[in-house]
Image (cartoon, rainbow, N blue to C red):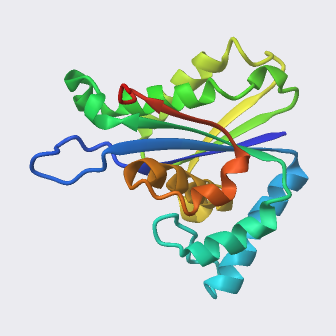
C-alpha cells in the first residue's frame, strides 16, 4: 500500500500592498510504502509529541512553524532510516497571472497536480491512499478529488484503488510529519533559511519552483 500525505506552507493571499502575505506557496507530498513503514512514521510522531512536547493525550501537534529545530531533529532521528520520499513544488506568487489570483482553488489544485506528476504512480501495484490537509469546504473537496482522480486515471493501473481523504492535521500524524518537511522547503524559499531543510534534504525526490525568477 502507498501512503501519501499532502500539506502546504505559506498562503494564497495576493494583496502585497495592504497586507503581508507570503511571497511563496509550497505544496509538499510525503510518500511512504508499506503499512509497517507508515505505522513506524506515525509512531515516531506520537513518540516525539510524548517525549518532547509532553503531550500524553496527543492533543498538541507537530507544526513546522511552531516546532523548535531541536524537536525536528529528534523526530528526524527516528525516521532517517525509513524509505520515504518528499516531493514539493513552490509557487512564486508574484509571477502568477493577475487573473488567476482570484481563482485560488484552481491554483491550489493545479500546483498539487504538478507535484503528483513527479510521483511514479505507474509502479503502484497496491492501493494508493492520499491524505490531504483539510482546508476546503465540501464543494471544493469534491472538485479537488474529481480533478486528481481524472489526472491520475491514465497513470494508475485500473486495478489499483485510489482513495482520497481530507483530515485536519491534529487527526493525522502523517500530515504532521508532512507539515514539518513542507515548512522546511517553504522556509528555504521564503527566508533563505536552510537549517532544517539541510537535515532532511536526502529524502527530497523533487523540489521545483513554479514561475521561477529568470536568472
Q: Residue at x 59, y 17 (%)?
A: 151
* Image height of 37 relative to 56, above or below: above
Give the position of the C terminus as an image quadrant.
top left
Q: Residue at x 46, y 66 (%)?
A: 65
* Image height of 54 relative to 27, above or below: below
Seen as rendered, the residue at the extreme front is 215
Depth order, front residue of 105/12: 12
- Residue 56: tell me if it is visible: no
- Residue 42: tell me if it is visible: yes
Question: Which quadrant of the view contains residue 115?
Answer: top right
Depth order, front residue of 119/57: 119
Q: Residue at x 71, y 85 (%)?
A: 51
x, y (%) of residue 147?
A: 52, 22
Count of all numbered marks drawn on residues in the image: 0
x, y (%) of residue 157?
A: 80, 16
- Taking the image as shown, residue 209 lies to the left or right of residue 82, namely left
x, y (%) of residue 1?
A: 84, 39
Q: Residue at x 43, y 53 (%)?
A: 192
Question: Which quadrant of the view contains residue 41?
Answer: bottom right
Depth order, front residue of 89/107: 89
x, y (%) of residue 200?
A: 68, 56
- Taking the image as shown, residue 16 lies to the left or right of residue 191, namely left
* Image height of 67 relative to 136, above or below: below
Amino acid at each position: 500500500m502507498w501512503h501519501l500525505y499532502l500539506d502546504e506552507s505559506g498562503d494564497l493571499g495576493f494583496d502585497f500592498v495592504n497586507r503581508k502575505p507570503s511571497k511563496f506557496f509550497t505544496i509538499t507530498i510525503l510518500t511512504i510504502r508499506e503499512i509497517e513503514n507508515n505505522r513506524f512514521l506515525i509512531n515516531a510522531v506520537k513518540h516525539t509529541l510524548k517525549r518532547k512536547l509532553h503531550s500524553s493525550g496527543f492533543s498538541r501537534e507537530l507544526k513546522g512553524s511552531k516546532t523548535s529545530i531541536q524537536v525536528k531533529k529528534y523526530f528526524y532521528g527516528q525516521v532517517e532510516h525509513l524509505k520515504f520520499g518528499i516531493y514539493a513544488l513552490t509557487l512564486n506568487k508574484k509571477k502568477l497571472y493577475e487573473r488567476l489570483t482570484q481563482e485560488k482553488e484552481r491554483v491550489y489544485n493545479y500546483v498539487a497536480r504538478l507535484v503528483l506528476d513527479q510521483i511514479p504512480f505507474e509502479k503502484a501495484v497496491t492501493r494508493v491512499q492520499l491524505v490531504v490537509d483539510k482546508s476546503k469546504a465540501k464543494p471544493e473537496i469534491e472538485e479537488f478529488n474529481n480533478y486528481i482522480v481524472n489526472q491520475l486515471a491514465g497513470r494508475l493501473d485500473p486495478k489499483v484503488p485510489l482513495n482520497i481523504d481530507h483530515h485536519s492535521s491534529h487527526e493525522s500524524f502523517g500530515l504532521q510529519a508532512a507539515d514539518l518537511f513542507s515548512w522546511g522547503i517553504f522556509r528555504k524559499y521564503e527566508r533563505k533559511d536552510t537549517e532544517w531543510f539541510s537535515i532532511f534534504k536526502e529524502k527530497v525526490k523533487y523540489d521545483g519552483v513554479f514561475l521561477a525568477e529568470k536568472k
